[in-house]
Amino acid sequence: MSQKNQNQKGAARKSRRLRITKKAKWEKILRDVDKTQVPITCLEAIEVNLVDGTIVKIDVTELIEEHNYDADLVEEMINSRLEKLDYIIRDVDFFINLDNVADSVQPLTDELLKNLK
């Protein structure tokens, strides 16, 4: 087999590889992680589902980025309000901002893995 044919076969093999986007990679990682403690800066929004069927959406990204509120203050305010209203809350849904998670974790991952290359 000629070198050209071998290179073409090698190129064809590479093109069949599954390419996973960064977003898909982070979605898979986050599905597999216990999410009992999520930094407020990694949240996009919180939906509070009340016992009467009302849904209250808190846009965390908007509060921190657009209104320039301090992240720790936003976290304190949300936790305080959730505790006070616990008796009428059915459940709470947390929506994670994948871009913020990736921006926070990727540099640490790169640093840890740089010596393995």
Image: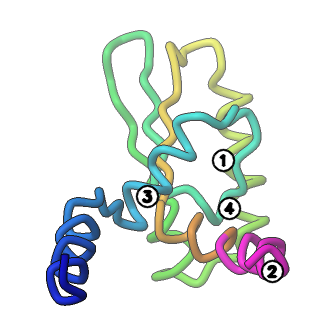
Image quadrant assignment for residue 74: bottom right
Query: Was residue 35 drawn as part of the magenta stretch in this picture?
Result: no
- Residue 59, which numbered label? 3
Whole-percent x, y for residue 62 in the image: 44, 71
Q: Earlier in the sequence, mark 1 or mark 3?
A: 3
Q: Which residue is mark 1?
A: 78
The reply to whether discs 1 and 3 touch (Cβ–Cβ < 8 Å) is no
Front in this rendered view, residue 4 or 103: 4
Q: Earlier in the sequence, mark 3 or mark 2?
A: 3
- Residue 111, which numbered label? 2
Q: CA distance from mark 1 to mark 4?
A: 6 Å
Q: Specify the segment rendered in magenta.
A: 106-117
Picture quarter with the C terminus: bottom right
Q: CA distance from mark 3 to mark 2?
A: 32 Å
Image vertical order of residue 103 relative to residue 39, above or below: below
Image quadrant assignment for residue 89: top right
Q: Earlier in the sequence, mark 1 or mark 2?
A: 1
Residue density around tag 3, few if under 14, some if 14–19, many if 20 or more, within 10 Å: some
Residue density around tag 2, few if under 14, some if 14–19, many if 20 or more, within 10 Å: few
Q: CA distance from mark 2 to mark 4?
A: 30 Å
The main secondary structure of the magenta stretch is helix
